[in-house]
Every structure is written in C-alpha cells, then in structure tokens.
Image (cartoon, rainbow, N blue to C red):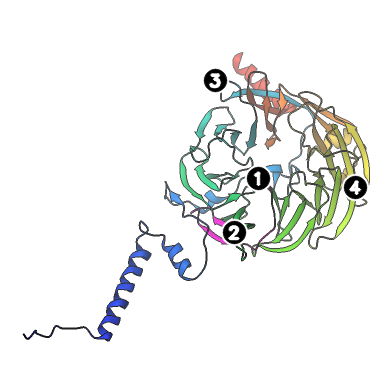
C-alpha cells in the first residue's frame, strides 16, 4: 500500500518559528504589567536583582515646582543645630495668648505619643501607627492609618514640603499624603525595612534601608544602603554601597561640604552627596544620642556614656573629646558666635562646652520635669543686650531650656545667668516653632494635649488694648 508523502518543515523554518515565539513572549511580558513586572523581567535578564516595588498612585495631578519647597526639618535645619537662625531677634518676656486642646474627639488621653510641628500643621504619632494632623488653631485636619502598618509607629521626624507629607514606616512602607487634607497621593514599599526617616534638599529624598542577601556560601547577611527616591512619583532611582549600619539611624547634612552624616548605634558615617559614596567613618565607644550636629566646620556627636566628640567635618579627624561625667539625655545644641555647645545629662544638669578648646565652662541643675530634654538657642533684641549688660559682639544669643516643672528658662551662655522665664500651662512636649512675634509649643496636661501660643509681652499688650477699645467704643 502506498502512502502519500507528508510535508515536513525544514530546519530553517523551525528555527524561524522558535525565534518568532520567543519574540512574542518577550513582548507580552514586557508590555503587560499584570502578567509580570517589566522592570523585574528586564533586570532578571541582565542578572540584576531589584528589591523595590513600583509605587501605587491615588492622585496623579501635576505638582508645581513651588509645591516641593521643603518645610523646616526637626531641630530647625538639616545641620541639626537647634538654633533659631531666622535672623529675627526675640523678647525675653512672653505671655500665653491662646491655649487650645488638641484632638478632643478622642475618648481618652493617649500615652506614648510624639509630636512634630511644621509652619502651620501639628502632627501627632501614636505607638499604634495612627497619625493625626491639626492646624495651629487646634482644628483636626485628618487622621491616617493603614492595615499594613497598624500596631507599630512611624518614624517621628517626617519629611514635608508645601504640598505633601511623607510618612516613613520601619516595615518598608512610604505614604505621601496631602499635608492639608490627608488625601493619599502615592504609596510604595521596599523589600526589607527602613532604618531612618527621609532626608531631602531637592526633588529626591534619601532613606536608609536594610535587606537580607544571600552570600556565596548560601548564608544570609544584612545589606544596609542609602536609597534615592523621587518625591513626586515615589519611584526608587538609585542605591548606595553597603554602609554597614545595623540599627536605627539619625541623619544630618552639611550644605557646605555636601556631606550626609549617618549616626547609628556606635557608628558615624559621612557620605558624599549626591554620589552616595562613603567619605569617612568612625567606630565609637558608646551609642550616639540623636543626630550629629554640624557647625563651624565640626561634627559634634553626643555619646550615651557622657562624652562629647568633636570631629573635623570634611576628613573626620578627631579634634577633641569632652567628658561630662554622666550619661547624656540629649544631642548637643549649638550657640552661634560663642562657638559653644549645650547638652543635658540624665541627672538634669545642663552643660556648656567651649568648642575651640573642648573644655566644659559651666553647668547648671535644671531640675527639669518637662517631657522634652532638648535645649535650643535664639537671639534677644538689642535693648535686652544693653539692659542685661551682655556683650554686643555675641549679638544677643541665649540658651532656652525646659526647666523645673512647666517652665522654659533663658540663660546667658557666657556664665549661665538666668535672663528670662516663660511660664507654661503644661509639660513642654515639643521644640517650638517661631512665627513673627510668637512661638507655638505642644503641652501635656492632665486631661490631654494642647497647643499653646506665647507672644512677646509688648505685642500681647497691644492686642489686649485693641480688643478692649473695640469692646468699649
């Protein structure tokens, strides 16, 4: 029986069919995000591992360039000086103008809360991961929580610009919210977790992340990097070399040297920006308290064991070490022109150190019963320089410290004389924000928390007189 010859494809035709099929599969995978992440697919072919996830957008309306203008970060600047350096001078006498309860809709007073004050917004962080915002008049603006981050708190030093606030959660989640309404603009996350809050001076922000990686011996090790994220889109752009950090990290930045300082446990690392390359690093004898303070070409580091270390900013050479003989409770605050640092130890003593010689000049028992330990510096106006017989060359710089119970004390940095006091209606729970002739602070009271406005006495008297004249025409 004869059978007809069936057609059999040649090897050239088979090879063409295989190439065509591979091209079709590649095109589908690259262009259809619901089947596979195109970025991960491309990087997989290139032999690179990408630990990031793509951001999810809830609002893609364009932002103006001025919307990305940053609000003042914690400790009054990225150099972390705690110096009110706006150029304005201040009175030494203040009266309480308003005292407004915050978040009165809550059933009970919350414990373990932290506060952040921006120019016109108050942010409250709770240990359960709920974030609340109010304006300076005490009106609640919004409340934010997420099932993905419930049960543990966010970092308490969020980044904010005129339009958005960026909430950083240790689990690796970032949320960009409208700072006035709380509306979520975008969210993203990383594989691993964060060790720091965010730093920024331009359209990008930088955060320290930590991930687990496999070594050649099939064991896991920790990789700590600085990652660059585009603030408007939430996209992860770049990451650094391994920084060898293990614990939570505080950030500070020198705009003169273009150096980002990372203080983490017993390590201090100076990273050149924007390249994110390590310029110098130090292993220390004790954990660092707070961020490094950058002033006058020096990096000041407070060690928990009770020492102030001073390093040369650009190269990391140690200048001197000052032993304060008691564990520290706060990072240093800088006093301009005097070139001195003020620190608080856990026994409630305030210490002033000369940064030229490294010598401790004087100390004073604050007997501080307030919630915060951090002092700050601000300038008094010229008439007080003359009245208090202060030296004109120091331009009125003074130390402002929480002291005793419900009080702020103002000191002359030269010898520690008290030159003013501000009586409070509760326990001081935040550093102040100065606006014109007033400053605002958060106070803890028996029933809850309040925002208080303290105005310079002469300005307050003018308001009182004007109100009285309107009431009695």
Could you say whether the residue bearing mark 4 is in a helix, strand or loop?
A: strand
Callout 2–callout 4 Cβ contact below 8 Å: no
Location of the N terminus by quadrant is: bottom left
Could you say whether the residue bearing mark 3 is in a helix, strand or loop?
A: loop
Callout 4–callout 3 Cβ contact below 8 Å: no
Crowding around mark 2 (Cα neighbors within 10 Å: few <14, some 14 to 19, many 20+) is: few
Instruction: State the extent of the magenta-drawn residues as a range.
Output: 227-248
| Label 2 vs 4, first from the N-terminus | 2
Residue 469 to residue 224: above or below: above
| Label 4 vs 1, first from the N-terminus | 1
Residue under label 1: 73
Q: CA distance from mark 1 to mark 3?
A: 31 Å
Q: Main secondary structure of the magenta part?
A: loop
Q: Position of residue 86 (x, y in %)?
A: 71, 44
Q: Quadrant of residue 223?
A: bottom right
Q: CA distance from mark 1 to mark 2?
A: 33 Å
């Amino acid at each position: 029986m004869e059978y007809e010859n069936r057609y059999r494809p040649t090897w050239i035709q088979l090879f063409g069919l295989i190439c065509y099929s591979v091209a079709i599969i590649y095109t589908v995978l690259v262009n259809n995000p619901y089947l596979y992440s195109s970025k991960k697919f491309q990087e997989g072919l290139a032999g690179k591992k990408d630990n990031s996830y793509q951001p999810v957008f809830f609002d893609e309306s364009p932002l103006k360039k001025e919307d990305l203008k940053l609000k003042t970060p914690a400790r009054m600047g990225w150099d972390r000086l705690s110096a009110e350096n706006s150029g304005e001078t201040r009175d030494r006498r203040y009266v309480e103008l308003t005292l407004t309860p915050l978040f009165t809709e809550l059933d009970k007073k919350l414990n373990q809360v932290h506060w952040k004050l921006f120019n016109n917004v108050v942010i409250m962080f709770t240990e359960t991961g709920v974030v609340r915002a109010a304006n300076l008049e005490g009106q609640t603006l919004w409340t934010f929580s997420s099932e993905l981050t419930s049960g543990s708190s966010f970092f308490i030093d969020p980044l904010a610009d005129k339009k958005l606030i960026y909430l950083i959660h240790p689990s690796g989640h970032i949320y960009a919210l409208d700072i006035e309404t709380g509306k979520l603009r975008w969210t993203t996350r990383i594989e691993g977790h964060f060790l720091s809050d965010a730093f920024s001076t331009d359209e990008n922000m930088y955060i320290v992340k930590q991930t687990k990686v496999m070594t050649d011996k099939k064991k896991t090790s920790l990789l700590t990097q600085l990652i660059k994220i585009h603030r408007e889109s939430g996209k992860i752009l770049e990451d650094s070399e391994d920084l060898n950090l293990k614990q939570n990290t505080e950030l500070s930045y020198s705009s003169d040297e273009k150096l980002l300082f990372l203080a983490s446990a017993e390590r201090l690392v100076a990273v050149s920006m924007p390249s994110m390359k390590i310029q110098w690093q130090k292993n220390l004898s004790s954990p660092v308290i707070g961020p490094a303070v950058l002033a006058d070409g020096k990096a000041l580091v407070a060690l928990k064991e009770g020492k102030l270390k001073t390093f040369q900013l650009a190269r990391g050479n140690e200048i001197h070490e000052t032993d304060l003989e008691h564990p520290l409770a706060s990072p240093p605050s800088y006093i301009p022109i005097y070139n001195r640092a003020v620190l608080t130890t856990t026994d409630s003593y305030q210490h002033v150190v000369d940064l030229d010689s490294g010598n401790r000049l004087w100390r004073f028992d604050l007997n501080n019963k307030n919630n915060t330990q951090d002092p700050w510096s601000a300038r008094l106006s010229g008439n007080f320089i003359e009245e208090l017989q202060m030296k004109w060359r120091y331009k009125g710089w003074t130390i402002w410290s929480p002291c005793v119970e419900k009080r702020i004390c103002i000191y002359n940095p030269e010898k520690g004389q008290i030159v003013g006091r501000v009586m409070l209606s509760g326990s001081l729970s935040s550093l102040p924000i100065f606006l014109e002739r007033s400053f605002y602070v958060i106070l803890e009271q028996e029933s809850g928390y309040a925002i208080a406005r303290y105005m310079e006495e002469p300005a307050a008297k003018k308001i009182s007189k004007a109100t009285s004249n309107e009431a009695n025409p």
